Amino acid sequence: MRKKLNQHLFVYLLILSLVITLGMNVQPLNNTIENHVLDAPEKNEVSTISNEPLLATAQRSSLTPIPIARTSMSPAISAIAVIPADPPPAPTADLPDSTKEETAIAEELVHTYEVTAFYLNVRTEPNAKSAIQKVVKQATRLEIVAETENGWLQLQSGGYIHGGYAKKVKKEASILSFSVTDTRQPTIEIQEIGAEQALESETIDELPDEEPTEPTSIVESESGLTEEHIAKIFEGTALSGEDLEQAILEIEEEYGINAYFTIAVMKLESGNGKSRLAKSKNNLFGLNAIDGDKYNKAFSFETKGDSVRKFGQLLARNYVGKGLTTIEKVAKKYCPANSKWPSLVKSIMKSDYRKL
């Protein structure tokens, strides 16, 4: 009898230990972890975790499931990591319409350029043969809205300048500074540092009437001449009406060759436009007219204006560019056979100045 009682007791203990062991090793399903935020249970509190895994195990073993009380130190609970939820995104408030408009304006601001040539022509079209609208001085600031493929800059107020004679100016002040005082309604403060300078550069005014500069022996210098002045200088000569004014100012603008000097050499070498080379080859400067066969070796040009442009290019590259910066120095290479050439050129320059 005692032997049977001991056997039953042993079986009950075995079953009880099996049930406890199964209950301690039960893990919640993945979806239970993902879909629930777990709080640490208080001491002696019965867990609310689903008993479905335990029930399935009990059914397989033909045992009746019993609830397992789990404390904060229970291995089943300690094995479950509490996964914090991702922090919600910070609230973003749309900027007010006025802010969007101000930002758009800031992005569309034009660029400021500064004139580097002594005098720069503002032309109606992006090419050197178009009409001159205005003339601006060196260091003048202009507002540019676009650049053409051939290197011309379009002005905000209309007209074009050549990009080779202007440089972009760095911004002197920040356009917009944002001061966020509230996460939902950011405010914008617009600082207009240097606004006066910007306003000055937006408008291109006609240059005031100025007296032309008195000529000197310096080849690379400003003349202060305009197309009207040059037309007056040409009055009564064969050079009048040949549309040379624009070309003469172009080489002063591009290369710095003084317009008085260009006109004087032209008059001297072409006999005021009446020489054979001037009439038949449009060569006003005797370019490449080498001794022995001057006429045949002299350059031919499609127009007299092309002759002027070639003269400016050669003077800049082969004379001024090599340190021959005065009339006397140029004469030694340009016309070494005529010792009076410098004085004749300067005499013509002074005479033309007195006509104005």
Image (cartoon, rainbow, N blue to C red):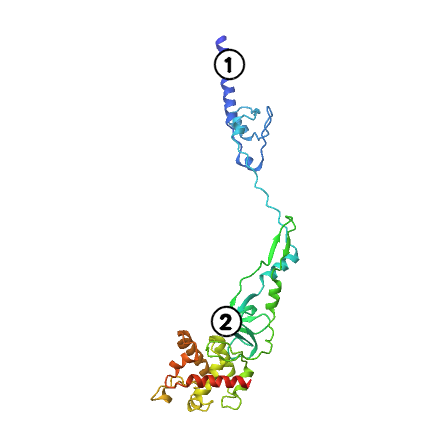
Out of 246 and 215, give the one closest to the viewer: 215
Q: Residues within 10 Å of mark 2 (few under 14, many from 20)?
A: some
User: Is 55 rendered above or below residue 245?
Assistant: above
Q: Which mark is residue 165?
A: 2
Q: Nearer the viewer, mark 1 or mark 2?
A: 2
x 44%, y 88%: residue: 270
Residue 9: mark in rendering: 1
Mark 2: secondary structure: helix
- When asked about the image quadrant of residue 122, the answer is bottom right
Residue 151 visible (yes or no): no
Q: Determine the residue located farthest toward the top in the rendered image.
A: 1
* CB atoms of marks 1 and 2 within 8 Å: no
Instruction: Evaluate whether residue 154 shows in this view.
Output: yes
Residue drawn 34% across the image and 89% down it: 293
Place of residue 273 in the rendered image (x, y in percent of width and height, measured from the top left): 46, 89
Query: Whole-percent x and y of residue 168?
Result: 52, 66
**Given the image, on which type of amino acid does mark 2 rest?**
Tyr
x and y, in percent, of residue 228 in the image: 56, 83
Nearer to us in this view, 120 or 219: 219
Identified by mark 1, the residue type is Leu
